[in-house]
Image (cartoon, rainbow, N blue to C red):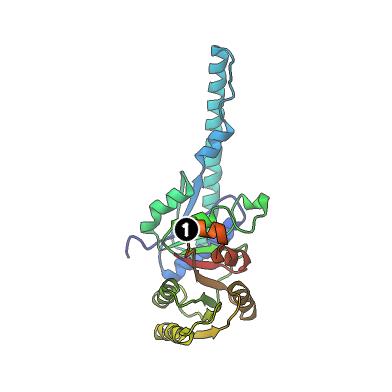
Amino acid sequence: MQAQDKVLACVDHSHFADYVTDAASWAARQMGVPLELLHILDRDAEVAIGKDHSGAIGVNAQQNLLSELAERDESRSKANRERGRELLNSLRERAIELGVESPDVRQRYGDLEETLVGAQDQVRLFVLGRRGESAETTQRDLGRNVERMIRSLSKPILAVTDQFSEPERVLIAFDGGSMTRRGVEMVAASPLFRGLPVHVLMSGKARRDSEKQLDWARNTLEQAGLEVTVALIPGDTERVIAQYVHEQSIDMLLMGAYGHSPLRSLLFGSKTTDLLRSAKVPTLLLR
């Protein structure tokens, strides 16, 4: 087994953590690789809560207040660490019940993006919640960290919705480009979707070589022993995919992510973000 053979699941204190654990456990079992559950503690948030309010009071009073604030910070940090350990232990038990052998848990202070980028050489698949702890109160349909993480990482990312059940049908959103061709090759080579029916859908603007591209995708997947269905449906990509997912009872979507720069996405919008917002199923994103 190579050093990079690991599924890394990012969890927090939201109910989405259960679904992330479920999805990561399924992926680790399918691929026969270790699972690690990671919880990041935000040191900056703790510091912001307990920042110095001593102002221009006397020296002794200031020293006493700073000592009191330091004690409060340490107490808060200890409570957060303990809360995090309880979360990880609970999710570890959940993963074991789902058939994962000896899942690993890790808790650390740091920045989520920096931590994941630093770990990706040892990771085959990242699993993130499409929404996280902050979305519990804001009700955002896409967590604030998701796009940033996807743009920063070069490994596949499974973005999990509010529910997860083991997929029975998979859809590849295929455009014939290099990224989605790599996705087809990855599905053919990986045990992740072994034994599952795989659908390949081309949508958007019509292309001269669409049929040829779909034939290539079908042949590549069938040679790997997969059951394949291909479809060519012109029209708005987001609408076509959403309708296909519903009509064909698709359980997981695979697509390329963020082919353009963040600036271009800011000015013109992003198909990846639109699809993530509209998709009701877990989505495997390729970079």
In the displayed structure, would residue 79 be above or below residue 11?
above
In the displayed structure, would residue 242 be above or below residue 9?
below
Helix, strand or loop at label 1? It is helix
Q: Nearer the viewer, residue 266 or 57?
A: 266
Question: Is residue 84 toward the left or the right of residue 3 in the image?
Answer: right
Say whether residue 227 is visible. no
Question: Is residue 150 toward the left or the right of residue 245 in the image?
Answer: left
**Residue that badge 1 annotates:** 151
Q: Nearer the viewer, residue 282 or 34?
A: 282
Q: Residue at 42% across / 84% down in the picture?
A: 216
Q: Residue 106 placed where, x, y %?
A: 45, 49
Say whether residue 33 is visible. yes
Question: Is residue 21 toward the left or the right of residue 101 in the image?
Answer: right
Q: Residue 187 placed where, x, y %?
A: 43, 75
Quarter residue 182 falls in: bottom left
Q: How many marks?
A: 1
Q: Nearer the viewer, residue 170 or 99?
A: 170
Q: Nearer the viewer, residue 22 or 206?
A: 206
Q: Residue 5 placed where, x, y %?
A: 37, 63
Q: Residue at 55% across / 36% down in the picture?
A: 46
Quarter residue 30 falls in: bottom left
In the displayed structure, would residue 131 be above or below residue 59?
below
Q: Residues within 10 Å of mark 1 (few under 14, many from 20)?
A: some
Q: Residue 221 placed where, x, y %?
A: 43, 82
Q: Amino acid at mark 1?
A: Arg
Q: Quadrant of the N terminus?
A: bottom left
Q: Residue at 53% across / 36% down in the picture?
A: 77
Q: Residue at 39% across / 85% down in the picture?
A: 223
Q: Quadrant of the C terminus?
A: bottom left
